[in-house]
Amino acid sequence: MKKRSIVSLLLIAWGTTALADTIGSVDTEFKLIGPDNKIVIEAFDDPEVAGVTCYISRAKTGGVSGAVGVAEDTSDASLSCHQTGAINLDPKIKSGDRDGENVFKKRTSLVFKSMQVVRFFDKTRNTLVYMVYSDRVLKGSPKNSVSAVPIQAWR
């Protein structure tokens, strides 16, 4: 098996569709042992739509459980997506799948919970719509955030 195939399989196993860059963070609660609770800001580029970047702010649990990777982060997240270059949409995206397409996924607990960003295409308004939400094996959360990117000519 080639190295690229192994890396792809690992990324799929960890549930990451796009990789995020950490932009910064702020502490929200002091923890005597382990890292503090934080709000983290991350950015990722849509893997299938060049020219779109999304920014997510999300809660990250600290303490001992957060340090060893077994803490469960809350479902609180905010999303802001922007056109950062020329956009040329694939006809598949223009078909406007009503279920959307996953463009980003990050685990927010050891096993059962993840935060996802899904992309939709609004044909009527020629706009990409992104939604962030958390899901869980048994019960997800209705907390969500939406951001829209109208497709415009890029200068």
Image (cartoon, rainbow, N blue to C red):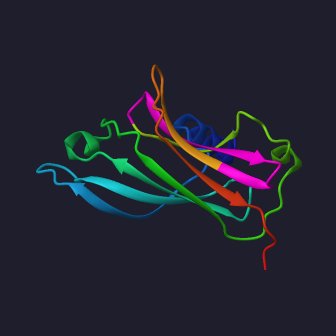
Left or right placement of residue 26 versus residue 108 in this view: left
- Residue at the far top in the pictured view: 138
Left or right placement of residue 63 versus residue 105 in this view: left
- Residue at the far left in the pictured view: 32
> Is residue 24 or residue 5 the one in the foreground?
24
Up/down of 100 relative to 136, above or below: below
Quarter of the image where one finds residue 118: top right
> What secondary structure do most residues of the magenta stretch adopt?
strand
Up/down of 155 relative to 77, above or below: below
Return the x and y of residue 44 as percentages of the image width and height: 57, 58
> Is residue 80 or residue 105 the one in the foreground?
80
The C terminus lies in quadrant: bottom right
Return the x and y of residue 92 as percentages of the image width and height: 85, 44
- Residue at the far front in the pictured view: 124
Residue 117 forms part of the magenta stretch: yes
Q: Determine the residue positioned at 75% across, 35% down.
A: 98
Look at the image and give the residue range highlighted in magenta. Answer: 109-129
Q: Determine the residue positioned at 51% across, 39% down.
A: 133
> Is residue 128 or residue 108 the one in the foreground?
128
Is residue 2 visible from the viewing direction of this image?
yes
Is residue 48 visible from the viewing direction of this image?
no
User: What number of labels is visible?
Assistant: 0
Return the x and y of residue 149 as percentages of the image width and height: 69, 59
Q: Determine the residue positioned at 11% across, 51% down.
A: 32
Return the x and y of residue 84 as percentages of the image width and height: 67, 70
Residue 149 forms part of the magenta stretch: no
Left or right placement of residue 101 versus residue 109 in this view: right
- Residue at the far bottom in the pictured view: 155
The N terminus lies in quadrant: top right
Q: Determine the residue positioned at 36% across, 40% down.
A: 74
